[in-house]
Amino acid sequence: MTSAGPPGAPASHPIHEGWTVRAVRGPVPSGVAGREVPATVPGCVHTDLLDAGLIADPFVDDNEALTRWVGLTDWEYRTAFAWVPDGHERQHLVFDGLDTVGEVRLNGDLLGEVDNMHRTWRFDVTGRLRAGANELVVAFRSPLDHAARRSLELGMLPNPYPSAPFHAIRKMVASFGWDWGLSTATSGLWRPVTLESWSTARLDRVLVEATPTPDGGRVRVRVRLDRTDDRPLTVGLVVAGAGAQASTSGTDVELDVEVAGVRRWWPRGYGEQPLYDASVTLADGEHLLGSVQRRVGFRSVAWDTTPDAHGTPFALRVNDQPVWVKGVNWIPDDAFLTRVDRARYRERLLQAVDANVNLVRVWGGGIFESDDFYELCDELGLLTWQDFLMACSAYSEDAALVASIEAESRDNLARIGHHASLVLLNGSNENVQGYQDWGWQRMLDGRPWGARYYDTLFPALVAELTPTIPYIPSSPFSPGGEPANAEVHGATHIWDLWNERDWLDFRAYRPRFVTEFGWQGPPAWTTLTDAVHGELAPESVLMEAHQKARWGNHKLLAGLLPHFPVPRTVDDWHWAMQLNQALAVLCAFGWFRSLAPHNSGAVIWQLNDCWPVISWATIDGAGRPKPAWYAMRDAFADRVVRVQPDGDDLQVVAGNDTAQPWTGTVRLRRLTYDGTVRAELFLAATVPARGTLRLRVASNLSVPADPADEVLVVEFDEAQDHWFFAEPRDSALRLPRWDVAVEPDGDDQLVRVTPDVLVRDAFAMVDRLAPAARVDTGLFTLLPGETAVLRVAGAGEFDAATIARPDVLRCANQLVAR
């Protein structure tokens, strides 16, 4: 099975074949009880049962409830593998991910107990392998039962979902369900399993740091060895043509290499992303014992938190260049993690790039993503902010739990710490705010709540393992001892609007940086109807099964009514809620960006979904962009112009996120809905590079004669904005008659649409033409006689009448015209 090489050469073999899984104990249905089914490794119980046809798809209808028994069941995975002695001194079984609580046995002997899905488990099986067949068994206990039992042992602690004590088990928080996620509580071998054979020594841990210097860069490597004797060995480092070696008889080695002529790595929109291969080798004379490759980029990173007259900023600088953060929050892209491969990461991250995003925050209720994720972010110039995996809860400081969290953190910091894209490590999501603001003290009754992790353990690990990466204890975060979610200090989360207020109130905030905010909307029509096969009314049982937020659909309606009347059909409800989400996103991002440099960035909740659900995501669980994605793309464009309120007046705010000044003429027009010009003005304007320009709007333009029938149009080169003086429900919008022309362009179709009346916020729901269809242009507003050109891909051939159908070519007018 293992491959022999030169004396001392290591060998490894994946153990991914021949696995089966069976239910051992629990509320197992009769059709599953006693059955041993083929298992995929890496994989999980749910996907194995799906493949065997033994459960219904949890993503469909209310099947999630029908599969809850899976998380209440003990499961046993089993395989056999052949081994032939090959002269190596050591053999290790390595599990990169075991989800979550159980034991591992080899040929009936207990290798160890496991209790953390986020870390690597390594077992020395030297002397335990048999020549020929070997039996490997991994037995998992019910994660739901274990979490409940362990929570009682640790002492019940505050968390937002009392029926899911996720804080008591080192398992993905979101696997217990969230206000956008289904509960799976699955089990399985979710990352690779490998038998490693080696002699003399192996590279146990390799830490790589790349930093820029005036003449190029510097690479520092710290190596820890696992070895069988103390003979002298050679550790080597080669990067960009430069190299160094060191001889050691010990276990720890440090090498430094100065590299001339390397270029700086930049986030997208600020420069290129040159990456360099760093190769670390371990040798015994001429015999190679092991090697590790890392791709590194040379950049500096800092977050400015120097107090100023307005509070405390939280401003990113890369290579000493201020970066206005255009960010998205990332959750696991599938509730069943092993279905997310490199191709899927690339698809989703390219969607972020296409939306002009420059930072992705990996939320603490998910996972440390796979190497593919961070490698792709390096290549694409997407900055990454990584949370430690602590979210929305008090955490026990029990010694065993502290040791487990330290082990997972060490594993993952060593694995991801070299990535050029990684610019921030964050101790927790909302835990400090929870302690301060959510009434935890009474339930804590004087007990520790997790501060040890955020104030002591994590910063010490960062200083030891990834000293070039900045660290904060939690998000929201206020430096200097201010309340965690203080608006004018550090990074804030804004959730009172979604829960209690209108999205127009985003303009009541003047935050220095926003890490979370958002508005809900349903998925694309095809995604929704593929998942819900019964009644689609928002209060139906099946629709509520795909709405996880408490009173979510009621909040959707409450947030809609200031802008649109109550929808009376499912089609109109779906479109109205999608549109309202997009308008909320555009309002928030436009406002935050208009505050630059007072505000230094915003990170929307959230980019993606893990299943088909009504949520805050801009891309739904099937990978289809919602109208909100197009709104985000427009708000994050390199150059934007927006009309914003300024007390009782209006101002035009132009944002320029390019390295060159933006010079041109700003055209302002106040028009009636039929296109009649009531006032017009041309202004010469120059927006500095990476800067903001504000222009006051004269009263003859900002004060309408008839608010219900007038609009202010601002144009600056290709950038454009429309300021309506009345909400859609209070306006004189009429149903349009569309002039539509369709012509093929290669495999795509070019669609030209021209209305006879003013059309506000039009959108083509092309997934209704074909499930794989995509359109390049999102929300657009047209004056009478203006034309928009849409490129539709993946829909095949269609005619003008098909795309002009009122359920395909949507607009705000349809929701209010009488």
Image: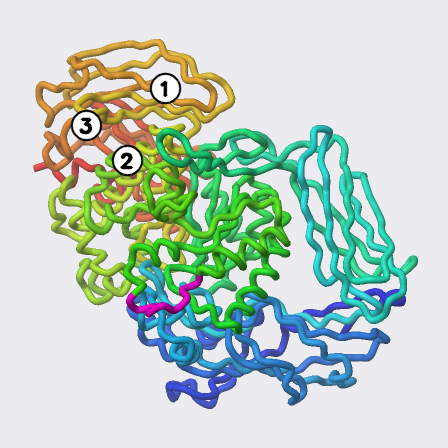
Q: Which of label 2 and label 1 is nearer to you?
A: 1
Tag 3 secondary structure: strand
In this view, 111 is above or below 603: below
Between 106 and 600, the residue placed more toward the observer is 600
Residue 309 position within the rendered picture, expressed as x and y whole percent measured from the top left: 37, 29
Q: Residue furthest right?
A: 285
Other residues around mark 2 within 10 Å, as few (<14) / some (14–19) / many (≥20) = many
Q: Which residues are magenta?
A: 442-450
Q: Tell which circle, 3 or 1, labels the residue nearer the N-terminal end.
A: 1
Please state which amino acid type lies under the numbered disc 2.
Answer: Cys
Other residues around mark 3 within 10 Å, as few (<14) / some (14–19) / many (≥20) = some
Specify whether residue 632 is in view: yes
Between 480 and 340, the residue placed more toward the observer is 480
Between 288 and 68, the residue placed more toward the observer is 288
Residue 604 is marked as none
Relative to 743, is 103 on the left or the right? right
In this view, 536 is above or below 789: below
Check the picture and name the quadrant holding the N terminus: bottom right
Q: Which residue is mark 2?
A: 587
Residue 693 is marked as 1
Residue 779 position within the rendered picture, expressed as x and y whole percent measured from the top left: 30, 35
Magenta stretch, main secondary structure class? loop
Please state which amino acid type lies under the numbered disc 3.
Answer: Phe
Please state which amino acid type lies under the numbered disc 1.
Answer: Leu
Q: Which residue is mark 3?
A: 724
Relative to 698, is 419 on the left or the right? right
What colouring does the structure picture have? rainbow
In this view, 34 is above or below 540: below
Other residues around mark 1 within 10 Å, as few (<14) / some (14–19) / many (≥20) = some
* Residue occupying image coordinates x 82% and y 51%: 236
| C-alpha span from label 2 to label 1 | 18 Å
Q: Quadrant of residue 310?
A: top left
